Image (cartoon, coloured by chain):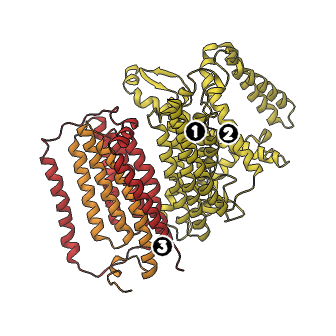
Amino acid sequence: MVPTNYYLILSAILFGLGIVAFVFKRNIITIFMAIELMLNAVNLAFVAFSQALGKLDGQVFVLFVIVVAAAEAAVGLGIIILTARNRRSLNVERVDLLKL
Amino acid sequence: MNEFLTNYAFLIVPIIKIAILVLVVLTMDAYLTWIERKVIAHIQARWGPHRVGPHGLLQPLADGVKFIFKEDPMPAGVDKAAYFLAPFITLMLALTSLAVIPFGPQRFTIWGYETHVGIADVNISLLVLFAITALGVYGIALAGWASNNKYSLLGGLRSSAQMISYELALTLSVVGVLLIAGDFSLRNIVNLQGTTGQGLLTWNIFPQIIGFICFFIAAIAESNRVPFDLPEAESELVAGFHTEYASMKFAMFFIAEYTSMITVSCLATILFFGGWLSPFPIAWSFTHYLPSLLLVPFGLWVIYDGVHYENIFGRLLLPAVGAAFTALGAALLLFPPVNELVQGPFWFFAKVFTFLFVYIWMRGTLPRFRYDQLMSFGWKVLLPVSIANVILTSVVILWRTH
Amino acid sequence: MTAPLIIFFVLATVAVLGAISLILQRHPIHSALSLIVVMVALAGLSLLLGAEFVAAVQIIVYGGAIMVLFIFVIMLLNAGEEERTNFSRLATFAGLPLAVALAGFIAAAIAHSSSNLPAAAQNGALSSTRALSMMLFSEFVYPFELTSFLILVAILGAVVLAQREN
């Protein structure tokens, strides 16, 4: 039987790695993927708690997190495509002025 | 030795079953290519392969040898990781999806380990199959992108877009069956179709005819077969996403395509046609002799054909094969316990072969869709019909339970 | 070393290696592939926790739809490899240890608070799909309807964003 703490520590490590990727990468799509990694780490924590406490609320919440991530990915990627077309670069350090 | 077997039976028995299944499925793939070439040839009024071995039966063997010995180049400028991984991913997913399919009703105990006919008996086998179908898009998208080739990229993107669109219709068309069965487990879906033992009339095809039509059309589009095979058609985009792939890697895509055809046919028989259930009611016990009644005349005909064959190799091989079939049929007649064991898998494979024949028949008969016709059909016709099927099924179920 | 523990460590290692590979890869496509590996490993961990429907939905929706969207966008925009930047080096030398320290702090805090949580009980019947859907449609029906509205808004937003300039 795997103690719940192991899952939570793994979730914390993955969340930390997501933060590192979010801060240090320069490609906007990779930064977006780091957000998805953080959401996944949190999903794992939810499922671990759901099993530890014996209730199903955690799993239901995971479904909602997945739905929100899907909606966010769709709209976010649309915005990224338009911005990349306007500025001709996917580097976030180039998108630092309000005017093109 | 016996104790070792009993202790580790939970590892050894699945490994043996996996080995048997992979062997059977790969042989079926190889001979499916032979059947396809022969059937399409006869539809087009020609003979198909008939030189390599009697009736061209050794053609798949020759093809396999060719694939092994052909040069396997890696074009310049490809993304090495993705180029290498794409056929592996496709083949791995296609073969893994066979793990959750139940082939027969029996549960038996080997070396103290209770098991069933099939590799994994999970509660959510249908969801596992959908998950694997969903992941199958990656093999094609990566293959198209990794080859340093405009046509491959276009073919790969078109093919993945087509697969994603029809995946929705595929999943929704099965929801009607799920509402009737109330369970994701494929074994329970088949068992529910056989509770009254009336044979053909209780199968899911009759309440769910719309669902079946949507499922079959979506499944053909998922496996990129005619009439939905524009992304990999030879006259269109060279060869689509597998242009830059040669011998063994192309063989992996090829095997993956035929294996996914087999998986989809298995799924269609389990969901809509009663899986391993016999179409005749259980009360008609004389139908239990049907397998042997089919095998013995077939074996005798093969012997007769072989004896009059033109070259010596055929005169030796065909009677041997025919004798094997006749012996099998006679053994089934003489040993009733073996006959009972064989009933389930026999009906299962008979239905799967019918579906595979329909697949091949369609390839020989229908022209292909243009890409925009394909996409508009998937989104504007198939998806609304699947949703309407779900709504209709739930309305009927609600009305019946009151 | 029971079997669940071995499986947990294998899947956890795969997930962490995938996340590290996401950071270290230069091309976004390879990062996307690493993220898919992480998601499949996490789905396996959810399966180990007895949440079978959640595991399947993670693979179908996250791995089979959202990541496919990412890969399409990367292929469409022809995102090349990351460029070298000459911005501050302090960020690299001081930032990385700080981020690792943050994650380590959270992990240590969890490890030291082991008294509150009961041992995880492996209860397969608890998380059957039927029970999950009953709960989804009885207690959580209001968030459920809200998420359907959210998806509608996202679809409209994506359609508006994808329109051509007239």
Q: Colour of chain B?
A: yellow
Identify the residue at horizontal 42%, vertical 49% (top origin).
Answer: C59
Q: Which residue is mark 3?
A: C77
Q: Quadrant of the N terminus of chain B?
A: top left
Against C124, is C24 above or below? Answer: below
Q: Amino acid at mark 3?
A: Leu
Q: Is residue B55 visible?
A: yes
Q: Secondary structure at mark 2?
A: helix
CA–CA distance between discs 1 and 2? 10 Å
- Labels 1 and 2 in the same subunit: yes
Locate residue A31: give its quadrant: bottom left
Identify the residue at horizontal 35%, vertical 60% (top origin).
Answer: A36
Task: Give residue B355's mark.
Answer: 2
Judging depth in this view, the residue of B187 and B343 nearest the camera is B187
- Labels 3 and 1 in the same subunit: no
Q: Chain of mark 3?
A: C
Rendered location of residue B397, percent (x, y): 53, 34
Q: Seen in the image, is B319 located left or right of residue B88?
A: right
Q: Are marks 1 and 2 in contact (CB under 8 Å)?
A: no
Q: Colour of chain A?
A: orange
Q: Earlier in the sequence, mark 1 or mark 2?
A: 1
Q: Colour of chain C?
A: red
Identify the residue at horizontal 60%, vertical 48% (top origin).
Answer: B385
Locate residue B154: give its quadrant: bottom right
* Mark 3 surroundings within 10 Å by alpha-carbon count, few (fewer than 14), some (14 through 19), many (20 or more): some
Rendered location of residue C55, percent (x, y): 38, 45
Q: Amino acid at mark 2?
A: Phe
Q: Secondary structure at mark 3?
A: helix
Q: Chain of mark 1?
A: B
Q: Which residue is mark 1?
A: B267
